[in-house]
Amino acid sequence: MSTATRIMRKLAQNNRLANHRLLTACLKLQPGEFEAVRTSFFPTFKETLNHILTIDWFYVDALEGGTLGPKAWDPEEPFDAIGPLAAAQFAVDERLLAFCTDLTDARLAAETRVHRTGRIQVERTDDLLLHLFMHQTHHRGQVHAMLAGSSVKPPQLDEFLTASDFRDRVDDMAALGWNEAELGA
């Protein structure tokens, strides 16, 4: 495995773990908190988390060679409750992780066709993946900040990639069915 493909796989693993931690915390929100208006780019947990999900659907579909395009966000908020939303997010996270696990250097450098309204956007796969990971991180940070103003303590999201962080991920690794050997590979 090349350094580039290893980095993309690690970013996909980090994405899956961060979403696991964040959405597990969000599942503990009190009634009404999921929809409550707050100060953020998208003013509710519901809007922000649905946005992360639909954009993930959009890009993961394109990376897989699909043609879903803007239908990914029709409707913009497909879920009114955190439980089904979390399950859908975990499913698309697994698709992204599978895609990144199977990457080759040639595929990273290859073009990905993104179906936009009225046009096809063509991007290098590695550039599109980096854009997607940045998008997810950006909006997860907003949800994390909103949690600080809720009944739920924001979870730790940045302890994952280094070997010395292993103590902080034991429970999450078990919940995801992962082990340290496959994480370090």
Image (tube, rainbow, N blue to C red):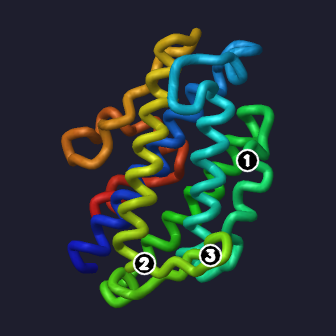
Q: Is residue 72 left or right of residue 63?
A: right
Q: Please tell me whether residue 80 is drawn above or below residue 16 in the rendered image.
A: above
Label 1: which secondary element: loop
Q: Residue at x 69, y 64 (%)?
A: 70
Disc 3 from disc 1: Cα separation? 17 Å
Q: Which mark is residue 123?
A: 2
Disc 2 from disc 1: Cα separation? 24 Å
Using the image as rendered, state which of residue 50 and residue 166 is in the foreground: 50
Q: Residue at x 41, y 55 (%)?
A: 133
List x then y, in percent, for residue 131.
Answer: 40, 60
Quadrant including the N terminus: bottom left
Label 2: which secondary element: strand
Q: Please tell me whether residue 104 is drawn above or below residue 71 in the rendered image.
A: below
Which numbered disc, 2 or 1, marks the residue that appears first in the sequence?
1
Q: Amino acid at mark 1?
A: Glu
Using the image as rendered, state which of residue 183 and residue 33 is in the foreground: 33
Q: Which residue is mark 3?
A: 115
Crowdedness near tag 3: few (<14), some (14–19) or many (≥20) residues, C-alpha within 10 Å: many
List x then y, in percent, for residue 151.
Answer: 58, 9
Q: Which residue is mark 1?
A: 76
Disc 2 from disc 3: Cα separation? 11 Å
Q: Amino acid at mark 3?
A: His
Q: Is residue 94 left or right of residue 161?
A: right
Crowdedness near tag 1: few (<14), some (14–19) or many (≥20) residues, C-alpha within 10 Å: some
Using the image as rendered, state which of residue 84 and residue 145 is in the foreground: 145
Q: Residue furthest front?
A: 118
List x then y, in percent, for residue 93.
Answer: 56, 56
Marks 2/1 in contact by CB < 8 Å: the verdict is no
